[in-house]
Image (cartoon, rainbow, N blue to C red):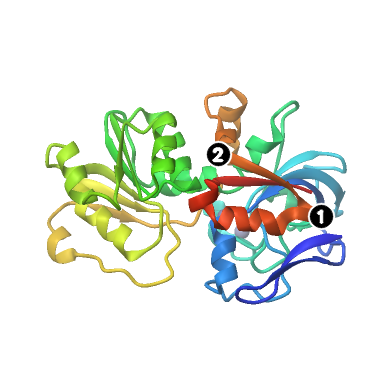
Amino acid sequence: MKGLVYRGPGQKALEDVPDPKIEQPTDAVVKVSRTTICGSDLHILKGDVPTVKPGTVLGHEGVGIIEEVGPAVSTFKKGDHVLISCISACGRCEYCRRGMYSHCSVAGWMLGHTIHGTQAEYVRIPFADTSLHRIPEGMDEEALVMLSDILPTGFECGVLNGKVQPGSTVAIVGAGPVGLAVLLTAQFYSPAEIIMIDLDDNRLELARTFGATQTVNSGRENAAERVMALTGGIGVDAAIEAVGIPPTFLLCQDIVAPGGTIANVGVHGTKADLHLERLWSHNITLSTRLVDTVTTPMLMKTVQSRKLDPARLITHRFPLTDILTAYETFGGAAHTKALKVIIEA
Ligand SMILES: [Zn+2]
Ligand SMILES: [Zn+2]
């Protein structure tokens, strides 16, 4: 089969790779129908994630049809239509029993990381019973690809950890796909204000149509001053970091209101300062999280009932044979205006 293989920093290729096989009784093999590219795949390609070994098929998002199940899989059978979670979970270890699947002692983020991923025609899913979700009849596959990673990430790491409440003020720093996923799911709670901050006018304009009440271009104006002005000098109840670099983390510290929360969503590759000399008396909370995907079944229901429309994040579509172009398009978002690109296998 064909798969997109990581060949070391800066190198990737669409290659012939062996078809995945059932290796453990709890495995399933899924025929991938649609997958996508994540910001973390770009981090891997930069060499930021050394736990990914050259030769690994990338990708941790997708939907497909079950091709084969191991003898211990009881929830799914050949032919079932499934959503693949970016986090694999054994369901039995101490962390899984606490709902913290991201830190599963035998699984966690494996796909496209420590084992072959979804940017291929087939993928092996460990612990299939607890790592796949059945897709209800008649649901839009493309929209559901957004539920493998970015929607639960935005919701769990940003909205839930940021304690967004009715009437609260929220700032989202970074209007990439995950920042926009925070924006979409924050609205479950009816916050009074959602201020979107980014450098890209196109993404800010889009954020307005997605429900942002204010937008700030941090390249053109002092974002901290602007947010303070918009909030009567108080700051925001929830400052959600969705970029992953020191200046955006600093901005969150500058705009968090007394008693507020800084919820980090971004993947950080370098150390960042925490200004405790200012914040020690500010009654703030700081949270970090790797997505657990515990909210995926709930999010699927909101998509099914049309309360949430994640298909709005899809801007481009490519066949798997064109995945290198898809990477170029996704990587060049500043000029291609790409958000999420769908790859049809
Ligand atoms: Zn991802
Ligand atoms: Zn576990």
- Rendered view: 34 above or below 117: above
Residue 88 shows in the view: no
Element at badge 2? helix
Ligand 1, seen in the image, is in the quarter at bottom right
Question: How far across and down, in percent of the image, does residue 194 sit?
Answer: 32, 35
- Rendered view: 165 above or below 38: above
Q: Which residue is mark 2?
A: 313
Question: How far across and down, in percent of the image, does residue 125 sit?
Answer: 75, 56
- Asked if residue 199 lies left or right of residue 17, the reply is left
Q: Which residue is mark 1?
A: 122
Q: Residue at x 56, y 58 (%)?
A: 331
* Residue nearer the viewer, 73 or 152: 152
Question: Which comes sooner in the sequence, label 2 or label 1?
Answer: 1
Which quadrant would the N terminus be assigned to in this image?
Answer: bottom right
Question: How far across and down, in percent of the image, does residue 70 sit?
Answer: 85, 55
Q: Residue at x 53, y 29 (%)?
A: 308
- Indicate which disc residue 324 carries: none
Element at badge 1? strand
